[in-house]
Amino acid sequence: MSEDQRFREETVKLEHTKEAIRTQIAGIGPRYTGNDYTEQTLDAIRQERKIRLTASEKEPYFGRLDFREAGKSEPLPLYIGKSGVGEENGHRLLVVDWRAPVSSLFYAFSGGDPEVAYDSPEGPVPGTVHLKRNLLVREGELQRVVDSYAEGGEQGGSAGDEFLLHKLGESKDNKLRDIVSTIQQEQDAIIRTEKNKAVFIQGVAGSGKTTVALHRLAYLLYRYQDRVRADRMMILAPSKMFLNYISGVLPELGVGDIGQQTFEDWALEQIGEELRLRDPAEELARWFEGDAVASGRSDTPAKRKGSLGFLAEIDEAIAELARTMVPDEPFSPDDRRILTAEQVRAWFAEENPLDPLMKKRERVLNRIKRWMEIELGKAKWSEAEVRKKANARWKAYAGKLPQHTAASFYKACGWLANEAEGTKRAGASSRSKGKSKASAVFAREDLAALVHIHLKLLGPTVPAYDHIVIDEAQDYAPAQLHVLRQHQRITSMTVLGDLQQGIHDYAGITDWAELKGLFPADETSYYELDRSYRSTLEIIEFANRILKGMGGGVKPARPVFRSGRPVEVERTAESPDVAAIAAIVEEWGREAELQSIAVLGRTAAACARIHAGLTARGIQASLLEAKQQNYEGGITVAPVYLSKGLEFDAVLIPDAGAADYGAGDAKLLYVGCTRALHRLKLLYADAPTALIAERDGAPEVASR
């Protein structure tokens, strides 16, 4: 069949599908406006279906698989889309949901032996693939038809690669998008992994690991809809800006109500106290703009407080608190009756040892109060007088049983290293408001320990999670993952990151074994994604050279063969040279395919100067800062350490000199370079960083 014939065939099919969808939309009818609760519920279901069908009308499907099930005489064309759509009579599907078991064939089959099988709830279903076709539909219009396999050998697998490259070559805006039409075989295997696992994904820059994790959430909700709920799922991401960047993926997949937070915000919610945290900008500047930490150090406060050993130290301190909870003296509600310390300890020992300590304290005190009331019921004198005196004594006795919150216990044990500094700052602030109360300042590395203490003292704040996604997990300490695991009855996690982008290794990990070891071996799965779909061949090869020789047991990025412009390394008069930067940005801005451009400076101060210089020259650009919650697209100026997780059509690194990037900054420079999809340029003044200078023929162009 010729290309024109295929296009005409699929155009007819598309029009038929759209008409069937429009008919179903029209049949839903008007909104219900009455007060009947049942009708309101049914109307909400109808409206949700209408929204789904309206989206399907614009893009009903992206693939076709002709599959002949064993024992059947003819292949059945299966059209695969983001959402399943049935015919009005309900006899068969117009569109098969991408998460359905049979759809796995579309992602797993890449040619070769057409005899295949897929796993259904009833068991394996064998059969034969006759056709695999990629379809690009935009706003209801068919734009592209590519056969990656056709019975008889009309098309080869290279056609599927061509379709993938076409999708990858599209310009990016300020949001991450779904990849349902281009999920690769190795990605699909991760998405469909069984629920009760801690799935670890080591993925190089641009391997799609974040998108895969989000698609996995959508799959789990479809596959285990009777066992998991969206409102019992959670995504943890490194920053609010990153959460904003990925916010469009799940709605595009028809999934809502999944919580999305940073670990800091989640931890503060669990602790339930108003704690003062160090300013995030100060924290980042402390590590990335000073020389406080050398890469890979294991003796930092963050490393110690993020260790399981520190949690064990906390457990011992809480156990000691429990052992000394009951005072040695008896309780007497009056001058005649005595409740011995031994009896109170016995009551305390009868409490469930797994229950939170402060709740056990509360129950024992209530038991003492009930004993007191029973005893006082036998008194012959005035009840009011007796009870008033007895209650005063009970309150005094209760005050001798230590009562703590997570923060008060943490401070009492002397673990808050900066308490004096925080008290001084808070005291000055309080005096300015006419108050004398001071408060301590906590750091990010304190939060996991505080959550752990809160669980031990007061118990969980929220119901157990059905599934947790942790992005950029190489920046997590074992203690953080441990406290998250404590919020699940059954292990069900997707833990993803890239050790090669571990720029927070003063607090995070250098080997996945540090986190995998928290779970029994049979509860974990490990996948490694080494194909990078983001950047061109030239950019990936250049970035790989920066990390050459670093080891770590992680495979370097393997680019999809999408060639582009060479990476440029250029000398300028000064660093940063705002005039040179402005000229490059203006030049790139005239290229239609470069919709998003990033200037990634080494420090926040340098970025502020660059942004001011561009603004003075009439160039409209956004300046990203640590506290910022939104990435707007267009031209962006940002410290390189804030760019992780984002991607841009073109990236300019304006200060790639030896003074700015030393040997310990290889991962940081690697992060900056791998943000680029199509174009990458690095500038330096006196001498380039040794990470790129004369390294395997690193390219250089004439000085400005």
Image: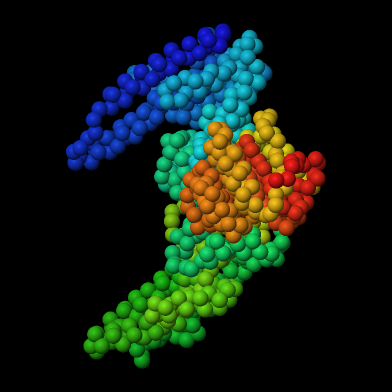
Residue occupying the point 48% across, 57% down: 266
Residue 303 seen in this snapshot: no
- 370 and 458: which is toward the camera: 458
Front position in the image: 244 or 191: 244
Q: What residue appears at the point 77 percent right and 45 percent down from the top-left corner? A: 548
- The mark total stands at 0
Q: Position of residue 625 (x, y in %)?
A: 53, 56
As drawn, 661 above or below 246 = below
Residue 169 image point, x, y percent: 59, 30
In this rendering, the answer to whether 643 lies above or below 120 is below
Left or right, residue 664 beside residue 163: right
Residue 702 lies, in percent from the top left, at: 74, 42
- Residue name at image x 53 percent, y 68 percent: 442
Q: Is residue 20 left or right of residue 286?
A: left
* Residue 340 quadrant: bottom left
Of all residues shown, which one is farthest toward the bottom? Answer: 335
Q: Quadrant of the N terminus?
A: top right
- The residue nearer to you, when weighing 286 against 602, is 602
Instruction: Check the image and tell me how it is coloured.
Output: rainbow
Residue 220 % position (x, y):
50, 38
Q: Is residue 161 above or below residue 383?
A: above
